[in-house]
Image (tube, grey):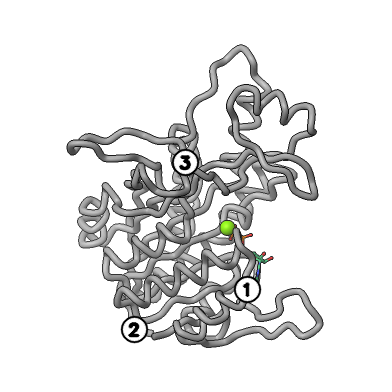
Amino acid sequence: MSTGSIVIAIGGNAILNPAMGNPDEQRRMIDKTCLEIAQIIQRGYDVVLTHGNGPQIGNILAMQEECGSVQAQPLDVCGAQTQGMLGYLLKQSLDNRLRESGINRQVAAVLTQVVVDESDPSFDTPTKPIGLYYSKYRAQKMMEQGIKMIQDKKGYRRVVPSPVPEKIIEEDIIKDLIREGIIVIAAGGGGIPVIQKNGLLAGIEAVIDKDLTGSLMASVIGAEAFLILTDVEKVALNYGKDNQIDLDEITTSEAQRYVEEGHFGKGSMEPKVLSAIRFIRSGGKIAIISNLDKAVPAIECRAGTRIIP
Ligand code: ADP
Ligand code: MG
């Protein structure tokens, strides 16, 4: 792979165990990740880093629900909070790792708004589960307040719309920063969801899939590669079964066929594979899905699953 710009998407689950929410653990995971990213920067890549926020936004919602005396903030504002929190932690850690490695590059975290379509079907039927699990009693109370909930094996969870990302508002700023040689952290948590009416922006309650926004980012900046880092090393067929097959390299049409055959988890691996396909179909050369601690071998084609034209 030749150097150039690369969009790296890291999973929210990979940086914070939602069951514990331990801030020290979160810092440790971020330091580990930023060490890998610093090594990629050292190889000459212009990195745009994006991150998930599932567990982090879940914790903010849980704190709001516990605190009856303070009014809850809407989801777009909670999303912005996670961009600030993770943007800060990632920037500080990356600054430190770059300094330790003697690399003279600056890092900027950009609050990023992403436009969605108000008539996206997901606003009528919210499907993305977020936050904690609740008892039937608690869920009923929440549903009475107009909060949409679904039930699965582990209990009740809040569900929110997850519309398709259409446009990154800060796109030009991000491109300018890249041209200046600045490492950019942007579009965290899939971006702050906004709608655009008569040229004016307004926040809307939704959570955009971070892998889809990462794919859009990679396309609009004309990235050389799109790297999705998560907590498994490879994309697999028959995942978790006796006949599991780990994939090294697949074409977009093979990937599409495996999606249709239902090989990938709906809210987990499937959006990653679809995001990789989108990037390649809009002109990208290579997308790679790999483990958080295998970022360097992944870009050297020694780890992960590569999706190619
Ligand atoms: P992230 O926070 O990085 O977005 P997710 O939990 O959303 O992480 O997605 C990664 C998870 O996808 C893995 O931990 C794995 O359990 C799951 N997964 C579902 N289907 C597959 C598959 N076919 N191959 C590999 N992993 C899969
Ligand atoms: Mg995910």
Disc number lying in front (2 or 3): 3
**The one of 5 and 246 positioned closer to us in this rendering:** 246
Q: Amino acid at mark 2?
A: Ser
Q: Is residue 111 visible?
A: no
Instruction: State the image coordinates of residue 104 (x, y, percent, origin top left).
Output: 33, 61
Mark 1, ligand 1, within 8 Å: the answer is no
The quadrant in which the C terminus is found is: bottom left
The residue indicated by pointer 2 is 2
The residue indicated by pointer 1 is 262
- Who comes first in sequence, dot 1 or dot 3? 3
Question: In this rendering, would 159 be left or right of 123?
Answer: right
Depicted 224 relative to depicted 123: above or below: below
- Who comes first in sequence, dot 2 or dot 1? 2
Mark 1, Cα crowd under 10 Å, few <14 / some 14-19 / many 20+, is few
Depicted 267 relative to depicted 219: above or below: above
Instruction: State the image coordinates of residue 25 (x, y, percent, origin top left).
Output: 68, 48
Q: Which mark is residue 206?
A: 3
Spatial CA span between label 1 and label 3:
26 Å
Q: Residue at x 38, y 51 (%)?
A: 186
- Who comes first in sequence, dot 2 or dot 3? 2
Disc number lying in front (2 or 1): 1
Instruction: State the image coordinates of residue 64 (x, y, percent, origin top left).
Output: 61, 25
Q: Amino acid at mark 1?
A: Gly
Looking at the rendering, the quadrant in which ligand 1 lies is bottom right
